Amino acid sequence: QVQLVESGGGLVQAGGSLRLSCVASGTIFSIESMGWYRQAPGKQRELVATMATGGRSNYGDSVKGRFTISRDNAKNTVSLQMNSLKPEDTAVYFCNAEKTLTIFNTATYWGQGTQVTVSS
């Protein structure tokens, strides 16, 4: 099992910045990808950003150019720097980890989520 604990959410005005962090613990070997998803009320969970162990990153279209993901493999952490925040960024942000089990199977883990609220 992998446990993910997020920190850093909160309330910020539009145009401001926040930084989210997530630390993984447990059976963390073979974690291939770590990242962030978000879910706003009444909407589906959507990709924010992920980063593979080798460093390749992937961003959701709505956050490109504003958010930056970083990862410290030695410390088993992933962070998300969010700049130029907009009210539409308001959501619960979930840390995500994908672990390779076999060549055909992966396991997905989620944190409890942290609320980000952007006021206009």
Image (cartoon, rainbow, N blue to C red):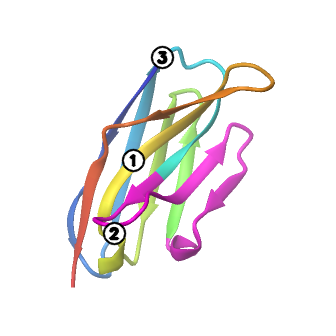
> Measured from the top left, where is residue 57 in percent x and y?
67, 54
**Which residue is label 1 attached to?**
94
Q: Earlier in the sequence, mark 1 or mark 3?
A: 3
Image disc number at residue 17:
2
Q: Confirm whether the magenta stretch covers residue 65.
A: yes
Marks 3 and 2: which is nearer the front?
Answer: 3
Amino acid type, label 2: Ser
Check disc 3: other Cα within 10 Å, few if <14, some if 14-19, many if 20+: few
**34 in relation to 18, above or below:** above
Q: Residue at 37% across / 66% down in the picture?
A: 43
Q: Which residue is mark 3?
A: 1
Residue 67 magenta-drawn? Answer: no
Q: Residue at x 31, y 66 (%)?
A: 42
Q: Nearer the viewer, residue 113 or 24?
A: 113
Q: Are marks 3 and 2 in contact (CB under 8 Å)?
A: no
Pointer 2 local density, CA inside 10 Å: few below 14, some 14–19, many at least 20: some
Which amino acid lies under the numbered mark 3 shown in the image of this protein?
Gln
Give how far across and how far down residue 84 sits, in percent.
39, 78
> Judging from the image, what secondary structure is the residue with disc 3 in?
loop
Q: Position of residue 16 (x, y in %)?
A: 30, 75
